Amino acid sequence: MPPIINPDLCIKCDRCVNICTEDVFFGSKKHETPVITYPRECVHFNGCVDVCPVPGAIWLRYPMPSMIVYRTSSDYRAPPG
Amino acid sequence: MEEQLIECDVLCVGGGIAGLMAAIRASELGANVVVAEKGNPHYSGCGRRGNDHFETWIPEVHGADKEKFIDELLKTAKGEILIGRDILRAQFGKAHEIVELWDEWGIPMRQKGKWEFAGHAFPGRMMTHIKYEGRFQKTVLVQQARKRGARIMDRIMVDELLRDGDRVIGAVGVHTREDTVFVFQAKAVILGTGKCSRLYQGLTPGMMFNDGHGGVQTGDGRAMAYRAGAELMNVEMPQRHIGPKYFAKFGQATWVGVLRDAEGKPVGPFVSEPDRRYGDIVMEVNKLAPEQYGERGRGPVYMDCTGISDKDAAYMRHWHIHEGNVSLVDHMDAEGIDPRKHPIEFSTYPLRGGGLIVANEKAETSLPGLYAAGDEAMGDISAAATFGWISGDTAVAYARTVEHGDVEVTRPIIAALESRIDELRGRGNGPDWEEANIALQQVMTDYAGKVRNEARLLQGLAHLRRLRQKVDTELMARNQHELGRCLEVHNLFDVGELTFHAALDRRESRGLHNRPDYPFKNPLLSQAHIVRMEGDRPVTDWRSY
């Protein structure tokens, strides 16, 4: 579960660790790749992605239970068989 | 553990919109101000990711008489107004000045140099909300507070108020990363800790942070105010919100669409075609609509923006981002959800509780030296910004008239918190905060939830007390982070217990307080329902707004 860090791109600037109000990165050491200790407490507000200076070094994966329900033109058709 | 003493004139508890506005105003007036924030103030509170609408009277738009604006709000009230007219008068007497200040500080409140009123509106009636680009509002407010000399301390969870006689003389809190307790000696304390999440089961039971307002606003201010002897009100009156099904993030957002049933019929009578000026206010008039459709075997209910122009779609996206819904936009993009093609199912979100700290039009609570603003006192961003500012004014005026209290007289309170911390950190096994929190949500949802009666409330309260006993003697924290969560759970249990007491005492049905054993609304109870501590027991009372 989110966030996800690409250790090859992370420049260990600690910005994401500093801004996270929920502190999902608790226990991260200064100037090391952050650890994601409490992923279940992520509220997916994207602040860590916003402050990250390297595109693609951190991103969020939205958990399956929060996936939006939406309707397409075929959703109301009876299933085959 | 280390103990640090911090001295200041004004302590702001919580660095949300209210706390920062209080800090800005109090610092501007020359006070020595500290903001204690349990997260990071750039990204904390309901306004953390932005906002796009602000309720305000603007004299050059609405005319010189603000009473007409207030009349309109009351006439078209989207729910029962649980505050007095003097509060609204104070809010709208100041909000238009706050809007100008924000604009000056770099939060774009005007669009292309003009006020743009849109959304949250009944077609044909007075428009009450301006659109504004609030995405970076917290950063601007933090900068303004620092510029005026306020000291902002991150990662400090204030947990108890310190009181000498009637007067609040400071507070005590804990660092959520280091083993340090902070004792604040303050002439005035302003509470602005926000909403009360995690009290009831959320959209996905057990996933407590899938919540429209984040997961760390846990009624801390209400709980500590109550424990210090301040009055709370309407604790038993829950709230509900509405939004995209299963994706409860920040803000209701701007939808250029119509809420429709599965056959395409509008749910409400207000709009039949998408119109960016209005949105569909049925969502605010009846937030229960999707749930009611479900209960009656109808539905699903959709936010239908299909067929809108590319221009309207871009407008919607722009305001989604300023409202703090970047994750919504990201998620829709990633899943290939296009509101121009796909109706999006809306649901009524679960209950949220907590009531309010009793505060008057000057943000004064029932205790000298204690003030409250924001969601725990008056709700919505306009009120948070305005009463934050007003509380700064009032707190400084009070601080000028008093000397510092002696926090050593409150040593038993500080010692009790320190000993609780030692116990929580010292236990090697036992329930953690999450297990206790889920147990609390279960009993709140089942016994003080959508339908209540005396027997259920009494049984639920008895069960909650048994849980509380375990929490008091068995809860464990593996580290400082979990210690903070444990203290949040303590606060939630306090608010939960008060909810049961107040719900038992409100012998009527009103709004979302549904008691089939007292099925009618009692007009004589159209008052503030007060709860406060006497001895160590809650007592209730009724008082005019």
Image (cartoon, rainbow, N blue to C red):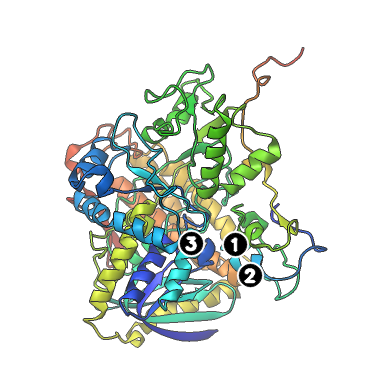
The chain carrying label 3 is B
**Of the numbered discs in the image, which one, if any, rests on residue B61?**
none
Disc 3 marks which amino acid? Lys
Please indicate, yes or no, whether residue B506 appears anywhere in the rendered image. Answer: no
Disc 2 marks which amino acid? Arg
Q: Quadrant of the N terminus of chain B?
A: bottom right
Residue placed under numbered mark 1 in the picture: B432
Disc 1 marks which amino acid? Asp
Q: Residue furthest top?
A: A81
**Of the numbered discs in the image, which one, if any, rests on residue B138?**
3
Q: CA distance from mark 3 to mark 2?
A: 32 Å
Q: Looking at the picture, does residue A68 appear above or below residue A33?
A: above
Using residue B332 as the reference point, say whether residue B126 is left or right of it: left
Disc 1 vs disc 2: Cβ atoms closer than 8 Å?
yes
Residue placed under numbered mark 2 in the picture: B478
Label 3 CA crowd tier, 10 Å (few <14, some 14–19, many 20+): many
Using residue A32 as the reference point, say whether residue B287 is left or right of it: left
The chain carrying label 2 is B
The chain carrying label 1 is B
Q: CA distance from mark 1 to mark 3?
A: 32 Å
The image quadrant of residue A55 is bottom right
